[in-house]
Amino acid sequence: MSIDHSNVIKPSQITFNKNSITLKPEESVLEALLREGHAIPNSCRAGACQCCLMQVTPEGKAHLPASSQQGLTSPEKELGYFLSCSCVPSNPITVQLPSEASDSAITTQITEVRPLNNTILRVRFSAPLDYRPGQYLNLLFTDDAGVQHTRSYSIASVPELDQTTVELHIKTYENGVFGRWIKGSSVQDQNIEIQGPLGHCFYSDSLAHDNTNTLLLAGLGTGLAPLYGIVRDALNQGFDKPIHLVAGARNSNDIYLIEELNKLEKQFPNLHVSLVALEGEEYEGIKIENIYDFCKNLDIDFSKTHAFLCGAQSFVGKLKKQLFLSGTPMKSIMSDPFLPAKNP
Amino acid sequence: MSDVSVFNKLGGAPAVDAAVDIFYRKVLSDDRISHFFDSTDMEEQHNKQKAFLTMAFGGPNNYNGKDMREAHKHMQLTDTHFGAVAEALVSTLEELNVPKEDIDSVVEIALSVKDDVLNV
Ligand code: HEM
Ligand code: FES
């Protein structure tokens, strides 16, 4: 009689902060890290609260047990997130806390700055970034006084369509630091530092195959930037069920990118673009209507809708609640709330 | 005496996933208690509902009575609040066609932490 060694469970290893830890039998990643004295947030230790969320390196994704990704969204799964309390890996993996994911910055040069309307600029630069449309970047720049600032902006471009050109839509304010910096002299030649990509609000190919029957993309102001990336990504990947893109603004003057959106709508029969503003003149098909009511009255099955919501936090929170109460599963609502900058 | 069997009988973590949206919708639509749950960070609240359901289903958890007291202390909960949550829980399980005996076990678990939750 011979012993079948394939059935003997070998202790697995994890690497965290360059330290290797050998797991005890049945020990979870969380337990091993806590045993070694690392401070990892946790609460229920039962896969429910998601406090203990961590991220594995891309090579390690295949070694995560399915139970460790139970309840996560498809973008989170794609990015290698897992619940460390529910993860007993079968092979060695390298793990980190989510916030450490992208600390290093790269430097690039701005190639184009063009106004899209009175306050919104299209900024383009070229960078070999591995991103998904809808994710965001941190821009680091130094103003005239030598003070460094960081601002987050969502990506409107699509790597498969725009190659290495990265596009951002940046709202400038009267006295905002970015506006002043970019309007300053010879800025075109100025270097800019970027960190990222970051964020979980992006299209995932699984939506074409699950029971999702509609995509709803709703954004206020430059919330349209990530949505423009996401919608072109979804169309480019062949999503052929109905897509409703709702671009909103306070005043109809502030609606932008109308020409591009119209062009896209003509090209793809399954895309329905709506422009809504709370006030102002009706032109170019812009409807003067409250965006929440507009979305409520859409003739779609909310329980089978997958939504992407981008814009100010109050808008995202309110529409998220509305959709959730109308039957959209929480896991099917991706959002990217824009948070106010901490310094002016 | 953690009764993991009800949790397993209901289907484990995926059962919690199936129940949480239904439960959270009920809670958010109930004027008696919605204000406790109507936070700006819906995802975080949603995850806390999952922690709640896992516990109520008798699943594995890391909470003790003191944690339950701490988590609920600032809300000054009353019998009415507790009753509303229990109702939402029961009607969620009914909607999912959970057998009566299992619903009874869940209610029993909820009642077992009532004093801690109400901080009495
Ligand atoms: C039926 C028994 C109950 C159980 C087993 C229970 C269990 C829990 C658990 C496990 C948490 C998560 C704690 C954490 O990890 O932070 C929690 C949080 C919470 N519970 Fe309960 N709960 C119960 C009753 C209630 C009632 C009656 C209310 C109010 C009507 C309530 C309101 C809340 C709120 C608002 C939170 C979130 C607190 C925060 O945001 O930090 N719970 N509960
Ligand atoms: S500690 Fe709650 S999910 Fe891991």
Image (cartoon, helix red, strand yellow):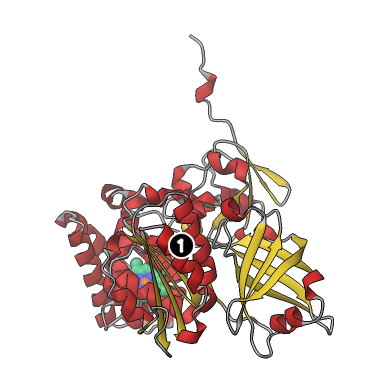
Residue A261 appears anywhere in the view: yes
Residue A80 drawn at (x, y percent)? 55, 50
Q: On what subunit does the disc labeled 1 rest?
A: A
What residue is shown at x 43% (from left), y 83% (from top)?
A: B74
Residue A250 drawn at (x, y percent)? 46, 86
Judge by depth and name the residue closer to the eye, A166 or B60: A166
Residue A12 drawn at (x, y percent)? 60, 37
Image side of residue A64 versus residue A17, left or right: left
Of the 4 image quadrants, the one containing the N terminus of chain B is bottom left
Image side of residue A333 versus residue A181, left or right: left
Q: Secondary structure at mark 1?
A: helix
Judge by depth and name the residue closer to the eye, B54 or A145: A145
Ligand 1's image quarter is bottom left
Image side of residue A29 versus residue B90, left or right: right
Question: Given the image, on which type of amino acid does mark 1 rest?
Answer: Leu
Judge by depth and name the residue closer to the eye, A225 or A96: A225
Question: What residue is disc 1 on?
Answer: A264
What residue is shown at x 38% (from left), y 76% (from top)?
A: A319
Mark 1 Cα within 10 Å, few/some/many (few <14, many 20+)? some
> Quarter of the image holding residue A194?
bottom right
How many circles with numbers are drawn on the protein? 1
In the image, residue A19 sits, relative to residue A2, either above or below, namely below
Q: Residue furthest left?
A: B100
Image side of residue A278 versus residue A56, left or right: left
What residue is shown at x 49% (from left), y 80% (from top)?
A: A255
Residue A50 appears anywhere in the view: no
In the image, residue A101 sits, relative to residue A183, either above or below, namely above
Residue A22 drawn at (x, y percent)? 64, 40
